[in-house]
Image (cartoon, rainbow, N blue to C red):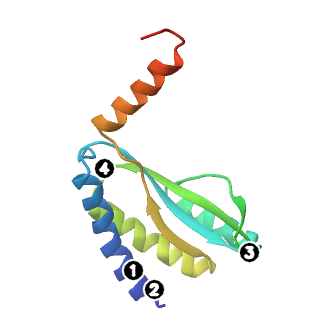
Amino acid sequence: MSIESQLKAQLAENRDIVQALLDDGSEPDAEYIIEHHFSSTNFDRLEKAAVDAFKLGFEVNDAEEMELEDGSVIFCFDAIAHHKLDVALLDKAAEQLLQLAAKQKVDYDGWGTYFVGDDMDDEDEDEDDEDDGFPH
């Protein structure tokens, strides 16, 4: 698949993900942790991609080794950004990161984030209440 077709698909997915989060009640003005996913069977290439992502201003976590269902091994890391669910920012990042992936010959596997909203806070509080050791 060409970079252009990958980008077109990713831009559409950006809108779908943002809309799904907002439809589920996630806070539109909250700051989100956006995790852009990279993978490769070649650790050296993945490491170079991580350095490039860092130079673009992303936080980069340590690469992890993962065994797939077929027994093969891949390496992966996330390039992390903190910002609102702004489609323009997501589109810009997707374009930069797809180009980076193509340059380093690794896979860009899209991005993910977590729901931010009142429902999430209520669930966390309920869990905290259960763990405090006091009867309710």
> What element does badge 3 sit on?
loop
Q: Are marks 2 and 1 in contact (CB under 8 Å)?
A: yes
Report x, y in % for residue 121.
Answer: 35, 32
Give the quarter of the figure containing the C terminus: top left
Dot label at residue 24: none
Position of 98 relative to 80 (above/below): below
CA separation, marks 4 and 3? 33 Å
> What element does badge 1 sit on?
helix
Report x, y in % for residue 112.
Answer: 44, 58
Residue at x 24% of width, y 44% of height: 29
Instruction: Write down the residue under mark 3.
Output: 42
In the visual, does 101 lie left or right of 84?
A: right
Instruction: Write down the residue under mark 2.
Output: 3
The type of residue carrying mark 4 is: Lys
Position of 28 relative to 89 (above/below): above
Instruction: Write down the residue under mark 1.
Output: 7
Front-most of 21 and 77? Answer: 21
In the visual, does 9 lie left or right of 65?
A: left
> What element does badge 4 sit on?
loop
Q: Quadrant of residue 70?
A: bottom right
Q: Are marks 1 and 3 in contact (CB under 8 Å)?
A: no
The type of residue carrying mark 1 is: Leu
The type of residue carrying mark 3 is: Asn
Mark 4 / mark 2, whichever is N-terminal: 2
The type of residue carrying mark 2 is: Ile
Residue at x 62% of width, y 52% of height: 61
CA separation, marks 1 and 3? 23 Å
CA separation, marks 2 and 3? 20 Å
